[in-house]
Image (cartoon, helix red, strand yellow):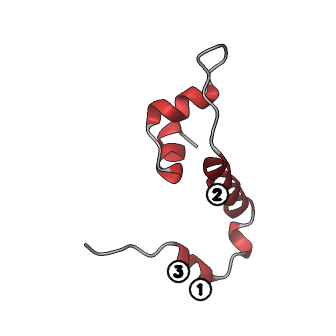
């Protein structure tokens, strides 16, 4: 996954996500809500074949403006 994709999942900027992967004193740390988003996406990627189609449809709904 790219930093841009992670940023989209967590609703954060690309620079914030890059900061999570930096080393040293300028490193940033994900907030608890970010960690929940990442854990959920990790779960979906790990078990995507076992997720029922109905759940995918609920998760991937797009909202019309």
The kind of secondary structure element at disc 3 is helix
The kind of secondary structure element at disc 2 is helix
In the rendered view, would you say 11 is above or below 18?
below
Local crowd at mark 1 within 10 Å, few (<14), some, or many (≥20)?
few
Q: Which residue is mark 1?
A: 54
Cα separation, mark 2 vs mark 1, equals 17 Å
Residue 35 or residue 56, whichever sits in front: 35
In which quadrant of the rendered image does the N terminus lie? top right
The kind of secondary structure element at disc 1 is helix
Q: Reading the chain from its start, which is encountered first: label 2 or label 1? A: 2
Local crowd at mark 3 within 10 Å, few (<14), some, or many (≥20)?
few
- Along the horizontal axis of the image, is 59 left or right of 25? left
Q: Position of residue 26 (x, y in %)?
A: 58, 17
Q: Which residue is mark 2?
A: 41
Q: Residue at x 62, y 55 (%)?
A: 37
Tag of residue 57: 3
Q: Position of residue 55 (x, y in %)?
A: 61, 81
- Tell me if label 3 and label 1 are in contact, CB under 8 Å: yes
């Amino acid at each position: 996954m790219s930093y841009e994709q992670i940023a989209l999942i967590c609703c954060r900027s690309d620079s914030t996500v890059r900061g999570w992967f930096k080393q040293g004193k300028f490193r940033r740390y994900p907030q608890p809500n970010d960690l929940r988003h990442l854990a959920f996406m990790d779960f979906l990627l790990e078990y995507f074949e076992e997720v029922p189609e109905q759940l995918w449809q609920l998760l991937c709904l797009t909202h019309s403006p």
